Amino acid sequence: MVRGVNFSHQQPVIAITSGEPSGIGPDICLDLAGADLPVRIVVLGDKQLLEQRAALLGKHIFIQSYQRDTQPKKGMLEVCHIPVQVPVRAGLLDVHNADYVLQLLNRAYAGIEQGEFAAMVTAPVHKGIINDSGIPFSGHTEYLAAKSDTPLVVMMLAGGGLKVALATTHLPLRKVADALTAELLTEVLIILHRDLQHKFGLSQPRILVAGLNPHAGENGHLGHEENTIITPVIKKLQQQNMQVSGPFPADTLFQPFMLKEADAVLAMYHDQGLPVLKYASFGEGVNITLGLPFIRTSVDHGTALDLAGTGKASSGSLFAAVSSAIEMCHRSKFE
Ligand SMILES: NC(=O)C1=CN([C@@H]2O[C@H](COP(=O)(O)OP(=O)(O)OC[C@H]3O[C@@H](n4cnc5c(N)ncnc54)[C@H](O)[C@@H]3O)[C@@H](O)[C@H]2O)C=CC1
Ligand SMILES: NCC(=O)COP(=O)(O)O
C-alpha cells in the first residue's frame, strides 16, 4: 500500500532512478548536482559508476551517500548506492546488469510505499536488454502498475504545449485493434480526465480522441472501431458531463485550430501520438504515468547508447520531469 506523502516540515524527497547504466541515464543525473531546487533530490544508482562517468565527462562533482535522516551538504549530489552487478562501459549493454536496473525501481518504489519519497522520476532503461536477461519487461509504466497492484494506468507525454495520452502503450501494432475495447477506452478516459484534474489542476479538462483507422474509419468503410467502440464510449462519457469529443482523424487532429480547443489528446497507440509530441518537444518533454497511486514522471527519450559518456546528452527532459514532479507534489499537498 502506498502511504500518503509527508510534507510536514521537511522538504519532499524525490527519488531519481538513474536507469540503464551503460546509457545516458547516469550522465544526465550528474547534471542534477548543485541544482537549485525546492526539493531534496536523491539519485538511485551505483556510486562508483556515477563517479567514473563524471570523470569520463570531465565533471567535478561531489557525491554524498544518501542517509535518510541526514540533510545533504549544499552542492553535493546525494546518491543512494545500489551496486551494479558487473562493471559498466558507456554505450555497451550488458545483460548481467538488467537486474540492477530493476533494483533501482524496486528501491524507489519501496521508498514511495514507506512515505520516504514524495515522487519517483525515472531516467531511461533499455527494455530489450531486460528481456534478453530473461525478465519480461514492457516498460516502467507497466512495471510500476504491476508493482503497485494498479489494474490500469495511462501513459501521457507532455511538451511543447501539448499533452498526448495513449489508450494502449507498449503493444505490437498487430495487437492494438483487439486491445481496444469499450471497457478499456472508458477506463482510460476516466483516468485521464481525473488526473488532468488532480495532477494538473484542470477543473473541466477537454479531451480530443483520435480515431484508430485512417480518416477515423471513413464511416465504417476503413475500419469499424470508431462506430462500434470509440463513438459509443465518447457519447456515454459526454452524458456524464465529461468534455470528450471525437473520434477525429489522427492525421488532422494535431493542428493548432483543433488543439486550441483541447487540454489533451488521447491517441489510440504509441506511434500515433508520440511522434507528434516528440516532434514538438523532444528533449524537453515529460512522460507521466497517470492512474498510479503515486507520482511518477520520466524523460521523453531513451537510453541513447551512442551518446553515453560523450557529454552530448541533454538533461533538459530530466529537469522538465523533475519540475513536473515537484508541481504535482505541491498540488497534492493542497488538495
Ligand atoms: N523512459 C524510458 O525508459 C525510455 C526508454 N526507451 C528505450 O531506449 C532505448 C533506445 O531507444 P531509441 O528508440 O534509440 O531512442 P533514444 O531516445 O534513446 O534515441 C533516439 C535518438 O535521440 C538521441 N537522443 C536521445 N536522448 C537524447 C538526449 N537526452 N540528448 C540528446 N540526444 C538524445 C539519440 O542519440 C538518438 O539519436 C530502447 O530500448 C527504448 O525502449 C525509449 C524511450 C523512453
Ligand atoms: N516511448 C515512451 C516509452 O517507451 C517510455 O516507457 P516507460 O518506460 O516510461 O513505460
Image (cartoon, rainbow, N blue to C red):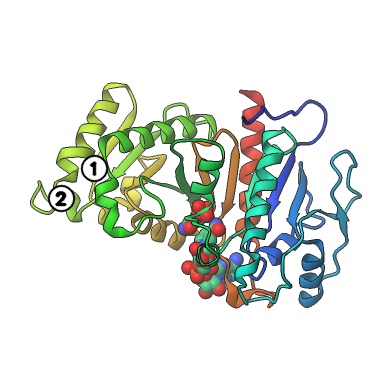
In the image, 291 versus 127, the foreground residue is: 127
Say which label, 2 or 1, has the lower sequence index. 2
Q: Residues within 10 Å of mark 1 (few under 14, many from 20)?
A: many
- Outermost residue on the front side: it is 134
Name the kind of residue labelled 2 in the image.
Gly
Residue at (76% x, 56% y) in the render: 82
Where disc 2 sits, the SS reads helix
Residue ID for mark 1: 247
Where disc 1 sits, the SS reads strand
- Give how far across and how far down residue 107 sits, in percent: 70, 47
Q: Are marks 2 and 1 in contact (CB under 8 Å)?
A: yes
For the C terminus, the image quarter is top right
- Give how far across and how far down residue 301 sits, in percent: 54, 62
- Outermost residue on the left side: it is 221
- Give how far across and how far down residue 150 sits, in percent: 49, 35
Mark 1 and ligand 2: say if the CB distance to the nearest ligand atom is below 8 Å: no
Residue ID for mark 2: 217
Name the kind of residue labelled 1 in the image.
Pro
Q: Which mark is residue 84?
A: none
**Where 186 sits versus 60, above or below?**
above
Tell whether 47 sits left or right of 135.
Answer: right
**Where 17 sits versus 53, above or below?**
above
Res. 90 image quadrant:
bottom right
Tell whether 144 sits left or right of 104.
Answer: left
